[in-house]
Amino acid sequence: MTRPRKATALLEMSGSIKKDPKRYANRADEPRPTSPIGDPPAEFLKETKEAQTKLRIWHEIIADAPDGVLTGCDRMMLANACRIQGAIEGGDYSAALLGQMRTYLGDMGMTPAGRSKVAAPKKQNGATNPWEEFAQLRT
């Protein structure tokens, strides 16, 4: 089986496109989703324990995902990942669910292999880390 095609956003963040632009020239006209991920599905907002678990997972994945990877086009994949992780946390440790969750996390750049393919975006002008200022004071 062939290796799945890596998302262009991940290639851009890793610097692959800058390194070899000719290799990715066929992706120049690829649609670039810009819409935000948006709100969680209505089913996650119910007052049940299962729904609250899925909502917690939704927010955890969004917070942990590399910046710029998840967009509005990824809502269904994210919702399905939350459903699967909710089932796993509920005690369903089937190989199929674990494998599907690993695939989703890899697609979102959230596995060790996935992270190795993503470079952190550069800081915006004016954005500072207060710990960096503290570290500079100590030197």
Image (cartoon, rainbow, N blue to C red):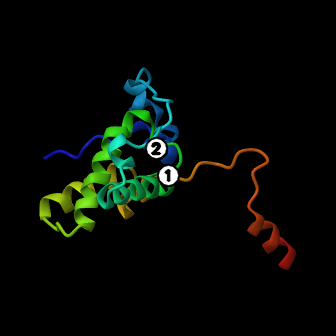
| 90 to the left or right of 31 | left
**x 40%, y 52%: residue:** 58
The C terminus sits in image quarter: bottom right
Amino acid type shown at disc 1: Pro
Decide: few, some or many residues near mark 2? Use Cα within 10 Å; few <14, some 14-19, many ≥20. some
**x 39%, y 58%: residue:** 57
Decide: few, some or many residues near mark 1? Use Cα within 10 Å; few <14, some 14-19, many ≥20. some
Residue under label 1: 66
Secondary element at image label 2 = loop
Q: Camera-side residue: 75 or 68? A: 75
User: Residue 49, percent across and down?
Assistant: 32, 61
Q: Residue furthest front?
A: 47
Q: Residue furthest right?
A: 137
Amino acid type shown at disc 2: Val
- Numbered disc total: 2
Tell me the CA gap for discs 1 and 2.
6 Å
**x 44%, y 42%: residue:** 70
Q: Is residue 13 above or below residue 112?
A: above
Secondary element at image label 1 = loop
Indicate which disc residue 51 carries: none
Residue under label 2: 69
| CB-based contact (under 8 Å), mark 1 and mark 2 | yes
Q: Camera-side residue: 87 or 129? A: 87
**x 31%, y 39%: residue:** 76
Q: Camera-side residue: 83 or 49? A: 49
User: Residue 19, percent across and down?
Assistant: 50, 41
| 63 to the left or right of 83 | right
Q: Residue furthest top?
A: 29
User: Residue 62, percent across and down?
Assistant: 47, 51
Among the 4 quarters of the image, the one containing residue 11: top left
| 65 to the left or right of 137 | left
